Image (cartoon, rainbow, N blue to C red):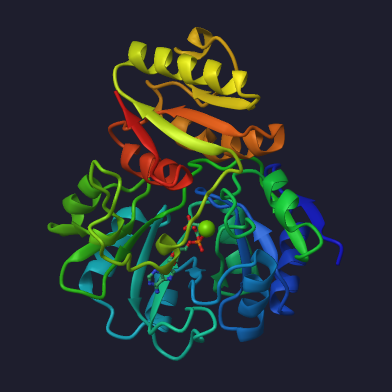
Amino acid sequence: MITKVMDVTGEPINIEHIKEASQILKNGGLVAFPTETVYGLGGDATDKEASRKIYQAKGRPSDNPLIVHISKFEQLESISSQLPETAKKLADAFWPGPLTMVVNKNEVIPYETTGGLDTVAVRMPNNPVALSLINESGCMIAAPSANTSGRPSPTKASHVYEDLAGKIDAILDGGSVDIGLESTIVDLTEDVVTILRPGYINMEMLKEVVGEVKIDPGIVYNDKGTTSGARPKAPGMRYKHYAPKGDLTIVSGEEQKVVSAINDMTATDMKNGKKVGIIATAATAEKYTAGSILVIGNRDDEKSIAHNLYDILRQFDEIGVDIIYSESFATPHIGQAIMNRLLKAAGQKTIEL
Ligand code: TXA
Ligand code: MG
């Protein structure tokens, strides 16, 4: 299969490309498209076959459910049974935006899309290309991140192409995404709203709208790097994910100590014939003495760190480093989401100084 790449970066959006992509979706094909978080790999959410194709293209386990992307709140009502009041409140506050809600499903969305679950994850993305694709196709679009399973999520069309060229019908290239980390997922099927995956919409923002909010014990790590032992409720959070080929360790502590520890370890590793990569910030980059040093962003601008994380992990794969050291980024607003992804990429390996 030849994967057609269509440029939708200009304004107004090239509607011919949106129409062509919509036709592919209506015919049961797959189209990757930009959202404000990461690129998604879309298929008609009501079409079992399309969902099967998504799993196959990604090499994704079929028990890991897909997120359904919509453009109108009524679509959520049309696919859920017993919609709680909190859904409307959260939608008013955060949609379109990087929040996914898990609700009880009815028969409209097939089990192939929900990985066999009786619940469905739904989100209204805040990206003009995504919204016009949903509107033009008339489809609710099932879309996981458009990466090969186990690789970092794609934040540029070129990342999608790297992973999925030849396996999907088309890619809508909308340029670099805005946030760069996947949406916050909340479970609305129990009494208290529960965060299943942290993202840009953080705990404080959710509390302001719904009051009490819990975090799934299955995704909380203690300072020894292990979870409480509880099983994460979002199936995707159970898999090893976002893993770079190089062995990643996070080093945290006072800046000067972190820099010298990383310099020492890098020197030793290089003596042992290893290729080393370092994830630095604009402020520390020039203090590192060896290795492939990539700047993730600026600590004063935490959005820059979220935005560049996956691209940097992919760059290290390309360079082919054996070992990666990263500083820690427990920043105020998005820090929980950044560290959740970074810790997973590191298999929880951290050194605290
Ligand atoms: O920002 C995002 O959410 C991106 C863009 C494309 O919208 N999508 C995304 O999809 O990150 P994916 O498939 O990579 O991650 C979906 C996550 C998985 O961890 C999956 O297990 C969880 O959502 N999920 C989906 N349906 C669920 C459900 N019914 N109950 C619990 N978790 C669910
Ligand atoms: Mg994913």
- Residue 205 against residue 124 in the figure, above or below: above
- Residue 244 against residue 240 in the figure, above or below: above
Task: State the residue at coordinates (58%, 67%).
Answer: 134
Can residue 293 be seen in this snapshot?
no
Spot occupied by residue 80 in the image (x, y as percentages of width and height): 37, 82
- Residue 76 against residue 324 in the figure, above or below: below
Comparing 52 with 240, the one in front is 240
Spot occupied by residue 340 in the image (x, y as percentages of width and height): 37, 46
Comparing 111 with 46, the one in front is 111
Task: State the residue at coordinates (19%, 55%).
Answer: 209
- Which quarter shows the N terminus? bottom right
Comparing 278 with 160, the one in front is 278
- Residue 307 against residue 21 in the figure, above or below: above
Task: State the residue at coordinates (69%, 35%).
Answer: 320
Spot occupied by residue 213 in the image (x, y as percentages of width and height): 17, 58
Spot occupied by residue 325 in the image (x, y as percentages of width and height): 49, 28
The residue at the far left in this view is: 212
The residue at the far front in this view is: 272
Q: In the drawing, does residue 320 fall left or right of residue 182?
A: right
Task: State the residue at coordinates (41%, 25%).
Answer: 301
Q: In the drawing, does residue 100 fall left or right of residue 246?
A: left
- Which quarter shows the C terminus? top left
Can residue 226 be seen in this snapshot?
yes
